[in-house]
Amino acid sequence: MPSTFYVTTPIYYINSDPHIGSAYTTIIADVVARYKRMMGYDTFFLTGTDEHGQHVLRSAQAAKKDPKEFSDELARRFVNLWKELEISNDAFVRTTDDYHVKTVQLFFQKMYDKGDIYLGKYEGWYCVNCETFWTDKDLDENNLCPTCQRPLEHVKEENYFFRLSKYTEPLLKHFREHPDFVGPDFRRNEMLRILEDGLEDVSVSRTSFNWGVPVPFDSKHVVYVWFDALVNYVSAIGYGWDEEMFNKYWPADVHFIGKEINRFHSLVWPAMLMSMELPLPKKIFAHGWLTVNGEKISKSRGNAVDPRVLIKAYGIDAVKYYLLRDIQFGNDGDFSEDNLIVRINADLANDLGNLIHRTLSMISQNFDSLPAPSEVGAYDDEIEKLTIETIKEYFRFMDEFKFTEALTNVWKLVKFGNKYIDLTEPWLLARDISKKARLATVLYNLSDLIRNVAIMLSPILVKTSDNIFKKLGQKFEGIETLGWHKTISGVKIVVGEPLFPRIDTKKWKKVINMTKEEAQKTNENSQVTIEDFSKLDLRVARIVKAERIPKSEKLLRLILDVGGEERQIVAGIAKIYTPESLIGREIIIIYNLKPTKLMGVDSNGMLLAAKDSNKLRILTVDGQIDPGAKIS
Ligand code: MSP
């Protein structure tokens, strides 16, 4: 049986825009998923959106939208963001998905039948923002939500309750028998303290609104949004609809969450699973909160920075490297743009970038291909020993989610690579033909160190690692190739440009607090030159024929007149435009786009369209102009 690994993130409320804080957990979970895949585990990585509840309902009402439509629109934003951040999730669960709703009802019914859910009356406080019930004893004199500091609402409702109190002892026993159940240790201890005080029953349904999963046996009630949300971890992997998949991946290996939702995950969720007689997750890891440049992340402060702005300015690999290297996973941490720039310049451009560029340049100057090792010399033992040690330490740290330590350790090796160059002085060896054999060994050893570094970095610096492999003419052939002297020699290498250009801090404008548009315009590396633009051949084309592509909801086949030339393109606009409405219209196309096939149909060019959060419109010209006219 191959080993499996199941990792999750919280499912995010759709009504807040994702910011660097919410992206943090997903980035970490992605790194772990990629690491486990690399280690050969059959990995399942789940993320998704939490779409029911009063907060979402109110936001939908404020936007004058039906809550389901509102959710559809906003859930897409998360799906797209994760794509842009190269998140490798295997599934995306939405709590409005049918299979999820059914599984929630199954849980509710079974727990009710067992006597673990009973009807009662709730009177107390509720935070709509956090969707959390609070009692008087949780509050200080300000009567604000202890988590988000917003005003609370007084609630008096008939509710179903979950007999959480019944599970105090079984949970205590589980915590004692599984000291690693909740991490980091100080978070486990917080939970233990709550348990030792004894748990109270909790409300698990609402009656004052109906945007939620209906309670199967009482249509006046919808299931409380947290009960609903927690079930995602099992509904998404088949509980209630695909037993085989469920048994394959459950129990989860780790739920990654932020510290503020630890009680729900470490106490309520395990108790629900105990009630359902299901195994508990192996680990819950509650990390700290990020601030941005020292301040709490909030829309009103303008620092709820869109992760897209950051990756556009700095590149996804650099942002990820910084987050994992500088912020001690588990503790609170600060996202500082200054420190990000320091890391890019010092670690990525200087240490790693230079090591690779120097090594590859020397290979290309002195050999036709990557040389094989031959004459052993001073410092070779050291570089070999350190590589082997680093690999061992890397596994240990990654397995414990100690990313800062894992990267610091890899960087010791990177720095040693640069030192090995200084010690072995390959530029002197290159001057003396009799030392060519020694030069070959030195450059092979360096290439081998770099290849090992690239493997270790691959779950984090995905593109960079891929680039390094290409530069060295290597292919990644599995984790067994992580080790000394497993680089293939005799292959062509590519020197190319240094991997990370240095940021000139004097000229650079920082992007936090800028809007996405401003950030795009400001920094040089996101600007295009007129030469870049002139590579695009944009032309006016008249649509002469349009038809739907069978079996596709989105695609239309368009026949165009481009100044006497007939062209066929495929466009994803069928949901917005009927074929008839397009005939005779003059549109703008990219004329010199590489041809491709979509749903088996040739597409030779692409039409331009503008898109906002909910509309799409094709670009046309202002008045009559001959088809084929160039756009400049
Ligand atoms: N919908 C619930 C979770 C249900 S899981 C069964 C929820 N959603 S949320 O949109 O508010 O997301 C909260 C999570 O986002 C945190 O637990 C954390 O993972 C992440 N973060 C949000 N802000 C963050 C920071 N400022 N810093 C780090 N992580 C942050 O709660």
Image: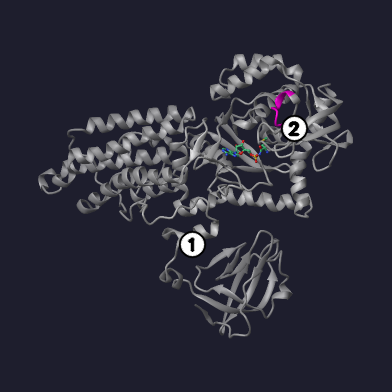
Judging depth in this view, the residue of 149 and 3 nearest the camera is 149
**Where is residue 605 drawn, in percent x and y?**
55, 71
Q: What stretch is highlighted in magenta?
A: 137-143
Is the residue 102 above or below the residue 627 in the image? Answer: above
In this view of the protein, can residue 30 be seen by the observer?
Answer: no
| Marks 1 and 2, the one that precedes in the sequence | 2
Judging depth in this view, the residue of 460 and 267 nearest the camera is 267
Q: What residue did someone put label 2 on?
A: 227
Q: In which quarter of the image is residue 278?
A: top right
Ligand 1 within 8 angstroms of badge 2 C-beta: no
Give the SS element for disc 1: helix
The image quadrant where one finds ligand 1 is top right
**Where is residue 380 drawn, in percent x and y?**
22, 33
> How crowded is the residue under tag 2: few (<14 C-alpha within 10 Å), some, or many (20+)?
many
**Residue 244 on the magenta span:** no
* Residue at 65% over, 44% down: 92
**Where is residue 183 drawn, in percent x and y?**
56, 25
> How crowded is the residue under tag 1: few (<14 C-alpha within 10 Å), some, or many (20+)?
few
Give the SS element for disc 2: helix
Q: Mark 1: which amino acid?
A: Lys
**Residue 521 - label:** 1
Q: Is residue 326 left or right of residue 418?
A: right
Ligand 1 within 8 angstroms of badge 1 C-beta: no
Q: Mark 2: which amino acid?
A: Phe
In this view of the protein, can residue 169 be seen by the observer?
Answer: yes
Q: Main secondary structure of the magenta part?
A: loop
Q: Is residue 437 left or right of residue 350?
A: left
Q: How many marks overall?
A: 2
